[in-house]
Amino acid sequence: MAATAVLPDVGRRATRRIARRLLPFLFVLYVIAFLDRVNVGYAGLEMSRDLNFSDSIFGLGAGIFSIGYFLFEIPGALIVERWSARKWIARILLTWGLVTILMAAVHTPHQFYLARFLLGVAEAGFFPGIVVYLTHWFRYEDRAKAGAIFMAAIPMSSIIGSPLAGWILSRHWASIAGWRWLFVVEGIPAVLFGILTLIYLTDWPPQAHWLAAEERAWIDAELKREKAEKSRHRTWTIWQAMRSRAVILLTLIYFFAVIGIYGFVIWFPTIVQRATNLPNMAVTLLSALPYVAGLVAMVLNGWHSDRTGERRWHTAFPLFLGAGCLLVAIYSSAHLPLAFVCMVIVGACTTAFMPSFWALPTAILAESAAAASIGLINSVANLGGFLGPFFIGYLRTKTNSFSPGLVLLLICMIASGLLALLLRLPQVHSTQTSRLRATEP
């Protein structure tokens, strides 16, 4: 029996209505966000040659996004918790859309570095802000499923973005290079949805006039009960939470995982192109396949994590599997079909762990402590988004091979999985898990 089957009628109605109202919209926002964050990987198929950028220059520019992201992440998450998610998310969308469009004007390495840095500053706070926002609407028991639907935008952005990028790269409207049009075309939706966000989103359940009064009262009472339960077990200030063993471990887990995620996402199209010498359109279509697999893996892993109430192994196992497949891909590089299939699985694994992982901070912390800690985890960890692309580019330039950089990704994924297994969840998590399992036959 599913956990929702024991809910009262009002609870089932509220949960369904909240999911239908919020999750598709948040999903679209994150598709736009991730598309604008990683479209440089597709632009690089033409951009590096047009601007005479070396692999080191391209890797540094792609990764420097994470430096700007790091600096402004924690304040953004706190603003969502304490002020208004709707207004802050709208501001983020508008500014990153404009910066993405300005990327089309890049001509020199320093302009490239500056534009990517400003894009990180503009987008800072978006992802942790949404993670915090989900805690305003979904109970712990439903949070990994909700997170899986939202985070499925990561693979979906590449499923959509890969063929779209291939098509735009082949265009030269007004005698302007296709890679420049790529930034313009993919920046405009962020601006438009920034305006729409102000109209569509609601900050808190008591403000949700699209819910019936009894539904608003039910979800508000459920979330207050969860907060009170956490408070009985542990009450932390923001500073205590951010220097706790659990938050430090969560930060390290995500840091090493993100090195693998962004190292893969940014460089995979280039690796495919140089291994196959296929045209851009074929490369971008092949580059979408890991994300088709990742979409399925992410949703199933999030669903199973909620069903069982288990989080650590649902986080660690995909990372171990991805590392193993990456090892096979490295040693079978002379056999392209096998190496490619392994890389598809690696790409799926870099996203499959995320729903169960992001259910962990909100299982431990509440309110401002959770918001600040989520901001810390995401900001520090996203420095791995600098290191992954940079070191692959640097090692490729030094050794004329992608293998050393891929070995680095492999080691980081193993380290992330091992750290996940060291995490100890507080008693409140055990209580919630037991309650969830008690609903099953």
Image (tube, rainbow, N blue to C red):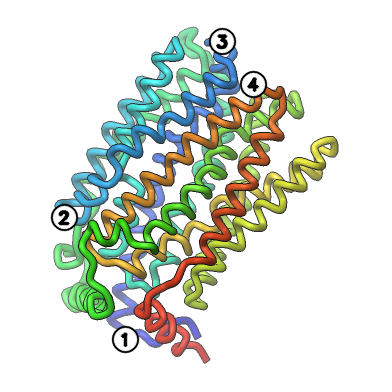
Can you identify the residue that label 2 sits on? 82
Q: Determine whether label 4 and label 2 are within 8 Å by CB.
A: no
Identity of the residue furthest to the right in this view: 335
Residue 191 x, y percent position in the rendering:
29, 33
The answer to whether residue 195 is left or right of residue 423 is: left
Gap between marks 4 and 2, in whole Å? 46 Å
CB within 8 Å, label 1 to label 4:
no
Report whether residue 29 is seen: no
Whichever of callouts 4 and 2 sits on the residue coming sooner in the sequence is: 2
Mark 4, mark 3: which one is toward the viewer? 4
Q: Amino acid at mark 4?
A: Thr
- What whole-number distance in Å separates the C-alpha atoms at marks 1 and 4? 61 Å
Report the Cα–Cα distance between label 4 and label 3. 14 Å
Q: Is 4 situated left or right of 170 in this image? A: left
Label 4 residue SS:
helix
Examine the image and state in which quarter residue 424 appears: bottom left
Say which label, 4 or 3, has the lower sequence index. 3
Name the one closer to the observer, 385 or 281.
Answer: 385
Q: Is residue 439 above or below residue 107?
A: below
Which one is closest to the eye, mark 1 or mark 2?
Answer: 2
- Which of discs 4 and 2 lies nearer the camera? The answer is 4
Q: Secondary structure at mark 3?
A: loop
Q: For the residues marked 1 and 3, what is the alpha-carbon distance in whole angstroms? A: 63 Å
Upstream in the sequence, badge 1 or badge 2?
A: 1
Q: Residue at x 50, y 76 (%)?
A: 307
Left or right: 337 in relation to 306 = right
Residue type, mark 2 in image: Arg
Where in the figure is residue 274, as x and y percent of width and height? 71, 25
Which of the two discs, 1 and 4, labels the residue nearer the N terminus? 1
Q: Which residue is mark 3?
A: 52
User: Which label is found at residue 8?
Assistant: 1
